[in-house]
Amino acid sequence: VAPASPAAARALGALRDTQRSDGGWGLEGASSDPLATALALLGLAAGQRAGADHADPSRAARGIEQLRRTMASDGGWPSHALIFKGFGAFHGSRTLTTAFALKATLAWQDRAAGASIAAAAAAAASAAAS
């Protein structure tokens, strides 16, 4: 999909329209979660590279703040449903949730909020390792 395509514009519009009051994103009928928030932030970051909405950095700062609030003391994030296994069962991975959360914050690292959460995660991980 080309960055300036109508499909990309619709996808970015959906991300912008579904950000929650806590700054995060989540599945319909569920609370905001760090995995959905990270994936939405990555989508907004991709839109920025294509010259998207000037308000996206503000949206991203709110999303990154939601990630900061949900980060565990060891610098990671809890597992959230990612893969549907059938019969109403989902598989989640703490490692994948953490990787996407960090990738999303780094995608916005030139913003003060992104830099601060990446630093907080690194400090927490370092403290947990010692």
Image (tube, grey):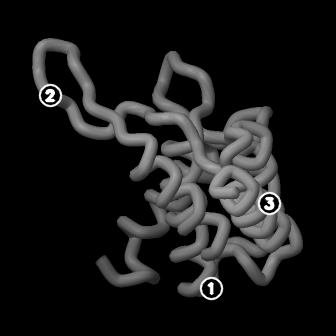
Q: Earlier in the sequence, mark 2 or mark 3?
A: 2
Q: Say which quarter of the image contains residue 88.
A: top left
Q: Does residue 4 appear to the left or right of 65 in the view shown? A: left
Task: Give, as a three-letter code, the residue at label 3.
Answer: Ala
> Dot 2: few (<14), some (14–19), or many (≥20) neighbours within 10 Å?
few
Whether residue 77 can be seen here? yes
Task: Give, as a three-letter code, the residue at label 2.
Answer: Lys
SS state under label 2: strand
**114 over 79 or under it: above or below:** below
SS state under label 1: loop
What residue appears at the point 36 percent right and 66 percent down from the top-left corner? Answer: 7
Task: Give, as a three-letter code, the residue at label 1.
Answer: Gly
Which residue does the numbered mark 3 point to in the structure image? 120
Which residue does the numbered mark 1 point to in the structure image? 51
Residue 55 vs residue 112, the one in the foreground = 112
Res 85 label: 2
Of the 4 image quadrants, the one containing the C terminus is bottom right
Q: CA distance from mark 3 to mark 1?
A: 29 Å
Residue 13 vs residue 127, the one in the foreground = 127
Which is in the foreground here, disc 2 or disc 3? Answer: 3
**15 over 85 or under it: above or below:** below
SS state under label 3: helix
> Dot 3: few (<14), some (14–19), or many (≥20) neighbours within 10 Å?
some
Whether residue 60 can be seen here? no
Where does residue 126 sit, x and y in percent of width and height?
A: 70, 62
Where does residue 81 sit, x and y in percent of width and height?
A: 37, 32
What residue appears at the point 52 percent right and 52 percent down from the top-left corner? Answer: 98
Q: Earlier in the sequence, mark 2 or mark 1?
A: 1
**4 over 95 or under it: above or below:** below
What residue appears at the point 77 percent right and 74 percent down from the top-left corner? Answer: 54
> Dot 1: few (<14), some (14–19), or many (≥20) neighbours within 10 Å?
few
